């Protein structure tokens, strides 16, 4: 069939339209992208219990740690009194009458080493009565797969309260999985330990797990929204992601429990689950998020709390006329100064001291995550208060509003009525964040969702994913997302930003699926949805082309298309995206008026059957591949991106 690409411009496309949504859910940060290998490195973990509106935590500072070997004549205790830093007041006191005994960390799934690779270990110790060496090893099957020693130093120490920092590098003699991290002493005695840390030496910027970073990089995200999601709000306000606590050295970042630790708690599981020890070390704090964006060439999009705990999980809020609320607004101003202020401004100085004197060039800020208006909670006037304060000081900062948890419901309708009432002020809201986790068929039925939006609206489709009954990342789900995205791109004048959610899932540690990228202790894979995001994001034209009646005709046959043009400076290519759910292969030829267009590249996402998914053991069952551009066929059950040029 012929597609004529000579149509008029439908919309200018935001070159940064396709981005990523990051949240520490499914062990996405601690135990995930944050490359720290030790679990509970500063002996501050808590065990979280409870349910909506009624949470409590039990301190469990020894979580993940045990004496090694199990039957050693030794004991450990979690104590406080002379901490390295007051923010994390606990540390581990170890006493042994046996040479070679030590402490051992469970490290999520255990320690994974790759033969020949290096690992940087550091820890703080107070030498009470030990002598000889501290010994750092990774033990697998009773043998050391990696090993290093460092002499115990002067008991007077050099840091506050007589602490001393020790650093060693381990080289893996062989590859191992599910091994134990052991920090021991060559002689008996007493020592105290804190902030025991181990990173693979190949971590990107010494922070990010390399394989996961590379999967993000492959998407070429236009922006990254962080740090969530619900963790922005917290299950209680004290549990929210308080970014200011993260703007310091990692050792001073106050540990917090993770809002996802209590997900799906119920009477049945006694309001406690296997995830109850999911904590946030904040090793990936706001500074690291900004570094991540910089390294990926993505625009940062931090989302701020508006003084409401997660509206699904809590009834807690700070009144809008309280000093506490003014503090939340002030946080927004301080964040912008942290990101963009000169290195001698109060918050710019904090950034400079963390190692980045140059500004991060923050342009967008989100006001609240998934909030809605209720009888008690006036989210709209909260938004207005933030908008007024931010734009009074930083008129160019673009603000993201919230349309609540789901589209096509009352809360969403009310939200749009509010934002529409400010349509005469183009700066009031840059885009409104909409969320839709729906059945795959919904995405097909709603491919024209944005066609009817008033053209004054600006949308951030900030969280979406096709949720099949199985809640798996199937090819079919991804194709439905791709079909929907053709409709999103055709409305690029309205939809300025778009991101799939959530981003990461750790095998055996997840609370929510589907997710974009899965990983375990050793490896990772992109889901079919990851390929879809990658293919859209790597093929952004400058202007969307009106394909006229062809779009509707094709949709009625199960074929979903959108087309764009790049500028002359970028080669004047045409980019056509086609999802073929028609049930049979389709062949296309393309013209621009009288000119035939030659296909110069063709990338096709395919898999063996609609239910196909990728897994750790079969990571490429569904994947995209470059195919012969001269072949005009787009096979049934695939998504293709074609680049075309005038012959
Ligand atoms: O993406 C998972 C969750 O879905 C997010 O935390 C929240 O914003 C939404 O409800």
Image (cartoon, rainbow, N blue to C red):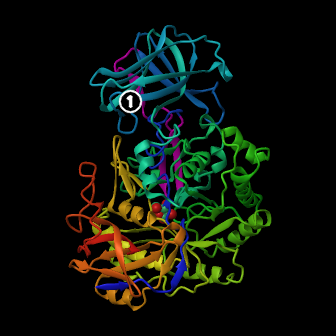
Q: Which residue is mark 1?
A: 117
Q: Can the viewer see residue 407 in this picture?
A: yes
Q: Position of residue 280 (x, y in %)?
A: 52, 45
Q: Nearer the viewer, residue 69 or 375?
A: 69
Q: In the rendered structure, does residue 85 fall within the stretch colored magenta?
A: no
Would you call the spot at circle 1 few (<14 residues within 10 Å), some (14-19), or many (20 or more)?
some
Nearer to me, 311 or 342 = 342
Please state if 72 lies on the left or on the right of 416 as rendered.
left
Q: Residue furthest bottom?
A: 549
Residue at left 26%, top 66%?
628
Q: Quadrant of the C terminus?
A: bottom left
Q: Quadrant of the N terminus?
A: bottom left
Q: Is residue 248 or residue 424 the one in the foreground?
A: 424
The residues colored magenta run 44-73
Occupied quadrant, residue 614: bottom left
User: Residue 232 placed where, x, y %?
Assistant: 57, 57
Taking the view exactly as shown, the residue that stands out farthest to the front is 647
* In the depicted structure, whether residue 324 falls above or below residue 645: above
Quarter residue 298 falls in: bottom right
Asked if 478 appears above or below 597 in the picture, the reply is: above
- What residue do we see at 40% from left, 45% from top? 211
Residue in the picture at 23% in, 69% down: 610
Residue shown at the point (63%, 50%) measured from the top left? 243
Question: Residue 474: where, in percent of width, then height?
Answer: 29, 64
Q: How many marks?
A: 1
Indicate left or right for 254 with 582 as reference. right
User: Would residue 625 be found to the left or right of residue 131 on screen?
Assistant: left
Local SS, label 1? loop
Q: Quadrant of residue 303?
A: bottom right
């Amino acid at each position: 069939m012929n597609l004529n690409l000579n149509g008029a411009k439908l919309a200018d496309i935001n070159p940064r339209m396709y981005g990523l949504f990051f949240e520490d859910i499914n062990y996405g940060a601690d135990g995930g992208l944050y490359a720290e290998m030790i679990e509970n490195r500063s002996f501050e973990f808590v065990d979280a219990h409870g349910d909506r509106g009624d949470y409590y935590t039990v301190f469990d500072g020894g979580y993940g740690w045990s004496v090694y070997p199990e039957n050693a004549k030794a004991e450990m205790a979690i104590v406080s009194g002379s901490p390295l830093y007051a923010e994390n007041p606990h540390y581990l006191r170890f006493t042994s009458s046996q040479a070679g005994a030590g402490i051992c960390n469970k490290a999520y799934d255990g320690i994974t080493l790759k033969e020949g690779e290096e690992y940087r270990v550091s820890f703080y110790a107070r030498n009470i009565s030990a002598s000889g060496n501290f010994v750092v090893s990774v033990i697998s099957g009773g043998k050391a797969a990696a090993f290093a020693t460092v002499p115990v130093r002067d008991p007077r120490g050099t840091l506050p309260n007589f602490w001393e920092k020790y650093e060693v590098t381990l080289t893996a003699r062989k590859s191992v999985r599910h091994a134990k991290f052991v920090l021991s002493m060559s002689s008996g005695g007493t020592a105290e330990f804190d902030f025991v840390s181990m990173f693979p030496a190949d971590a990107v910027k010494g922070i990010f797990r390399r394989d996961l970073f590379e999967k993000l990089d492959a998407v070429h995200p236009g922006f990254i929204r962080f740090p969530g999601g619900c963790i922005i709000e917290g299950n209680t306000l004290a549990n929210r992601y308080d970014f200011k606590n993260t703007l310091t050295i990692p050792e001073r970042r106050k540990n917090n429990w993770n809002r996802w630790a209590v997900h799906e708690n119920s009477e049945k599981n006694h309001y406690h689950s296997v995830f109850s020890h999911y904590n946030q070390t904040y090793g990936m704090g706001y500074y690291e998020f900004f570094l991540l964006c910089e390294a990926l060439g993505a625009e940062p999009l931090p989302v701020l709390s508006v003084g409401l705990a997660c509206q699904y999980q809590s009834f807690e809020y700070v009144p809008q006329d309280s000093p506490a609320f003014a503090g939340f607004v002030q946080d927004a101003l301080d964040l912008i100064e942290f990101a963009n202020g000169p290195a001698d401004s109060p918050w710019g100085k904090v950034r400079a001291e963390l190692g980045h004197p140059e500004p991060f060039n923050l342009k967008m800020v989100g006001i609240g995550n998934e909030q809605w208006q209720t009888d008690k909670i006036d989210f709209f006037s909260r938004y207005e208060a933030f908008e007024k304060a931010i734009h009074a000081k930083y008129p160019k900062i673009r603000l993201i509003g919230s349309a609540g948890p789901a589209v096509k419901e009352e809360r969403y309708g009310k939200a749009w009525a509010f934002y529409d009432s400010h349509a005469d002020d183009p700066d009031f809201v840059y885009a409104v964040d909409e969320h839709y986790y729906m059945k795959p068929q919904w995405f097909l039925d709603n491919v024209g969702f944005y066609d009817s939006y008033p053209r004054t609206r600006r949308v951030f489709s900030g969280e979406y994913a096709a949720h099949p009954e199985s809640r798996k990342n199937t090819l079919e789900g991804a194709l439905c997302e791709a079909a929907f995205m053709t409709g999103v791109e055709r409305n690029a004048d309205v939809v300025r930003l778009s991101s799939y959610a959530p981003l990461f899932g750790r095998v055996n540690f997840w609370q929510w699926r589907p997710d974009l990228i899965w990983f375990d202790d050793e490896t990772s894979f992109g889901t079919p949805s990851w390929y879809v995001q990658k293919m859209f994001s790597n093929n952004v034209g400058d202007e969307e082309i009106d394909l006229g009646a062809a779009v509707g005709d094709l949709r009625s046959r199960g074929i979903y298309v959108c087309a764009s043009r790049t500028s002359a400076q970028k080669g004047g290519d045409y980019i056509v995206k086609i999802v073929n759910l028609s049930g049979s292969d389709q062949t296309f030829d393309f013209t621009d008026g009288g000119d035939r267009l030659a296909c110069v590249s063709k990338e096709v996402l395919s898999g063996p059957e609609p239910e196909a998914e990728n897994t750790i053991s079969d990571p490429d069952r569904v994947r995209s591949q470059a195919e012969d551009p001269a072949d005009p066929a787009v096979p049934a059950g695939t998504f293709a991106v074609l680049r075309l040029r005038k012959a």
